[in-house]
Image (spheres, rainbow, N blue to C red):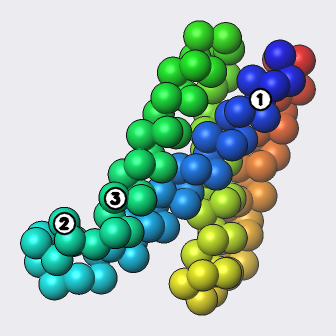
Amino acid sequence: MMQNYLLLVAMTILGAFAAFFLKKASAGDGILSILKSLNFYIGGFLYFVSALINIYILKHLDYSVVLPLTSITYIFTMLISHQFLKEKITTKKIIGVSLILIGSIVLLLGNL
């Protein structure tokens, strides 16, 4: 059972990196530029792998647990955007991510 929760965390990390690569792909001018970008394909591939893991996890865990726990993607997104895109981490972002983390922990503890 713990392996499924670890896979869920891996899935959210992949999703966060997928969005990062798509963000990098969006830097081009126009759709043709995006389609020529390697970042577009890396992002799409990571989303695809994340979706496959999601399907596997849904087979083993309750939907009412899996879907809310995917919100931890926002935590990884904030860290990735700060580290690689040099975006600022504001107090509001920290409060929001903290609330997500608290909610995820409460949900997790209620289902273990």
Which residue position holds label 1? 5
- Give amino acid for label 1: Tyr
Separation of residues labelled 2 and 3 (CA atoms): 8 Å
Which residue position holds label 2? 35
Closer to the camera in the image, 13 or 101: 13
Closer to the camera in the image, 16 or 108: 16
Mark 2 and mark 1 lie on one chain; the one further toward the N terminus is: 1
In x, y percent, where is residue 48? 42, 40
Nearer the viewer's eye, disc 3 or disc 1?
A: 3
In x, y percent, where is residue 49? 49, 39
Relative to 80, say whether 9 is above or below.
above
- Give amino acid for label 2: Leu
Mark 3 and mark 1 lie on one chain; the one further toward the N terminus is: 1
Relative to 37, say whether 106 is above or below.
above
Are there few (<14), some (14-19), or many (20+) residues within 10 Å of tag 3? some
Left/right of residue 42 with respect to residue 88 in the rendered view? left
- The residue lying at 64 percent from left, 51 percent from top is 13
